[in-house]
Amino acid sequence: MMIALKAATPQLPRTTAVADHVVAVDETDSTNALAAQMIGDGSLTLPDHQDGELAVAVVAADRQTAGRGRNGHKWISQPGRCSTMSYAVRIPRAIATDESVNGWLQMIAGLVTLDALNGMIEEYGAAPNQSDCFLELKWPNDVFCHGLKLGGLLSELVIPPSSGTDADADDDVVIVFGVGLNLALGACRLPTPQSTSLQLHVSGLPSFGEMRDAVAERQVEGFRERLAKFIADPKGQAESLREEMKAVCWARGRQVEAHFTDGTTLTGEAIGLNEDASLILRTQDGADHTVRTADVGVL
């Protein structure tokens, strides 16, 4: 019989030291939803970015009762085992709504997450159980390890109270990046056969609480640094990010099937990303197709 785990308010001393604002609760429906609600009612504010440094707020919960993923999917997490965090950052509306570059915001979230996980592993002197065990990103929003889902990301745009739908393009909006990570789940607690947990692949990890805090601290710093660079030069950073993604894009070079929201599918080889962060899928007839919104699975 599996014993139910009790939720407790996350203790995040390292994250609190670097973030502009931290909200931690034992349980909520969704950290993204809670962040959006607090931004909307003015109880969570982010100062203007000054001298190129961005403000980052964190909303954390030990248990989510209605965690969300892309395209209406659910994110299942367990208290004391899975990190459920949302990071809120103010960025210019013009960048957030520019379809030629805003797809890279999701890719940045993925790269920040990989950096944070790998940095935490290195800090504590932990080591992969197998030499070919490394973290990758499955386009557009999953963290993968050995072909299994270790985490998921969901970015959402929130309009702060000071702005409106007719606001000037120079106004800021808030992007909330939700990040769910299976850090300390045992094999018997995995929610699906396609999921995994960091502790199943890496030995010498610290306690769950230490891991969660160390990863979140690095994510705050990573979002602040990477998004500041992106805001300063979106087109230039897009090209750099495109190159960076080549090394960590799990789908690249694989035969995959894209499942679209209208029920149709497209099968082909994922050969890379376009300039706007969409996926390039080459079908058997040699034609290249652009995939912007789909679930992608390997064949």
Image (cartoon, rainbow, N blue to C red):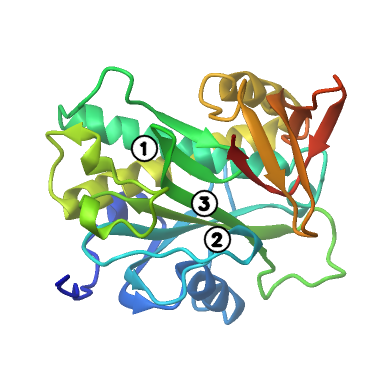
Whichever of callouts 2 and 1 sits on the residue coming sooner in the sequence is: 2
- Taking 272 as reference, is 284 left or right? right
Q: How far, Cα to Cα, is label 3 from label 2?
A: 7 Å
Identify residue for label 2.
69
Residue contact at pointers 1 and 3, CB within 8 angstroms: no
In the displayed structure, would residue 142 be above or below residue 57? above
In the displayed structure, would residue 101 be above or below residue 32? above
Work out which residue is located at the far bottom of the displayed protein and give it: 41
Q: Foreground mark, 3 or 2?
A: 2
Identify residue for label 1.
116
Q: At numbered mark 2, what does the secondary structure look like: helix, strand or loop?
A: loop
Q: At numbered mark 1, what does the secondary structure look like: helix, strand or loop?
A: helix
**Residue 236: percent from left, percent from top:** 72, 23
The amino acid type, in three-letter code, at marker 1 is: Ala
**Residue 132: percent from left, percent from top:** 33, 19
Which residue occupies the foreground of this view, 118 or 286? 286
Q: How far, Cα to Cα, is label 2 from label 1?
A: 20 Å
**Residue 18: percent from left, percent from top:** 34, 49
Q: How busy is the neighbourhood of tag 1: few (under 14 within 10 Å), some, or many (20 plus)?
A: many
Whichever of callouts 1 and 3 sits on the residue coming sooner in the sequence is: 1
- Taking 8 as reference, is 192 left or right? right
- Taking 65 as reference, is 163 left or right? right
Residue drawn at (68%, 60%) of the image: 173
The amino acid type, in three-letter code, at marker 2 is: Gly
* Residue 88 visible to the viewer: yes
